[in-house]
Image: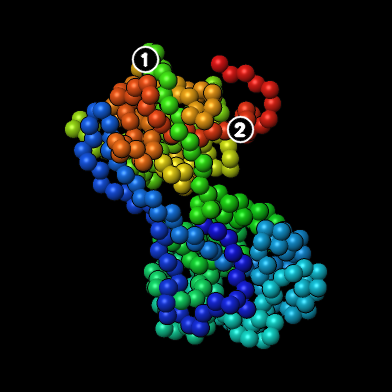
Amino acid sequence: MAVSSSSSGSANALACFHASLLAPQTRRTAVASASPRRDSVRMRASTAAPVELKKTVWVWTENRQVMKAAVERGWSTFLFGSKDLGEDWSSTARINPLFIDGPEIFDGENQKVAEISQVSSPRELELVQPDNVEVKNIVIDFRGGWQVIPAENIVAAFQGCRGTVLAVSTNSTEAQVFLEALEQGLDGVVLKVDEMDDIIKLKDYFDRRNEAKSQLPLTKATVSKVEVVGMGDRVCVDLCSMMRPGEGLLVCVGSYARGMFLVHSECLETNYIASRPFRVNAGPVHAYVTVPGGKTSYLSELRSGKEIIVVDQHGLWRTAIVGRVKIESRPLVLVEAKDNSGDDTYSIFLQNAETVALITDDTGSSGRTAIPVTSLTVGDEVLVRKQGGARHTGIEIQEFIVEK
């Protein structure tokens, strides 16, 4: 989702709430796959990219440092209770000042741009309906302790209506609750804070979920070696999200760390074991896995609640939460592959089992998008993500390093 700062003078300002407020987020839909065979797994994932969702952020503060931090992060719409303060700040920064007068919000030309509705009871919540709104923006101030359920009810009620529905948030955690309600979230938030830390945290939240703009470059590598090596401690990563055919985790063994293999999830039905679309049998304990922020983590360091990146064969990614990590001793197989555009060699250890697969491109004549490691042969092509440097505490750095 991308971050935008809403302006009352926007060219596409909407006259009333009667079309689409919250367009359903386009998801990469899973396409039913044929029954998997031992020699290959046939599956397809949609090539459609997700729709870029814009979330509005207005900042309500009397702290000039908070204002500066917000402007530096691209948020320029500010709410003021005093016109003198708004005019003073406008003289030092390029901002869009809005002024609060009771339950209404006006722009600098004294045009009404929004209404504030306080919600502290079910009855007050019922009054906040599209048919009762006459302006293009509504700001909801949830009071009385309940936030999640009322926010979900607002998302449902205003689905298909034009305009902007924002919720007053007193910290970045509350803002996240409103932005994720019923998955779609409200249209935006009014961040009412006097601490810079909340501005920084909210911007970091958007950056980590900026899926619409994020597509990781993947490249083909040709398998050059497949070797059964014996027992090792491997890690199954169970997520709090379902994965679709063609999705998995980017993993490498720590040696040859400049290439991450795309390991498929266990989302497919078989004759011998039920589908586990939340799980990736990712590799041994010392392997790296990609996490948000351009970082990696050892598989052994993953814990419940940690964020991780799920990637599909087109490079589109999304974040997910780790539910649990399961480490068990299992027979391993070593896979090495050479970069098709150079001489680099990458390697990965995986459990030697039919349910463990590497993702490949889906443009070939075979139509395969994943190959079980038990069927992997020299000459097969799989997808990897090339990395440019060594790693220190999960962060890419430029230094002399030899890995074997």
Question: On the picture, is 197 further left or further right than 350?
Answer: right
> Real-space Cα distance between discs 2 and 1?
29 Å
| Quadrant of residue 321 within the rendered picture | top left
Residue 116 x %, y %: 56, 78
Q: Which mark is residue 128?
A: none
Q: Mark 2 and mark 1 in contact? Answer it, CB < 8 Å.
A: no
- The residue lying toward the viewer, choosing from 370 and 209, is 370
User: In what element is the residue under mark 2?
Assistant: loop
At a point 75% along the width and 61% down the height, the residue shown is 68
Count of marks placed on residues: 2
Q: Which mark is residue 228?
A: 1
- The residue lying toward the viewer, choosing from 169 and 243, is 243
Q: Nearer the viewer, mark 2 or mark 1?
A: 2
Residue 132 x %, y %: 44, 84
Which residue type carries mark 1?
Val
- The residue lying toward the viewer, choosing from 52 and 44, is 44
294 lies above or below 352: below
At a point 37% along the width and 21% down the height, the residue shown is 378
Question: On the picture, is 31 further left or further right than 151?
Answer: left
At a point 68% along the width and 22% down the height, the residue shown is 400
At a point 46% along the width and 80% down the height, the residue shown is 17
Q: Which residue is mark 2?
A: 388
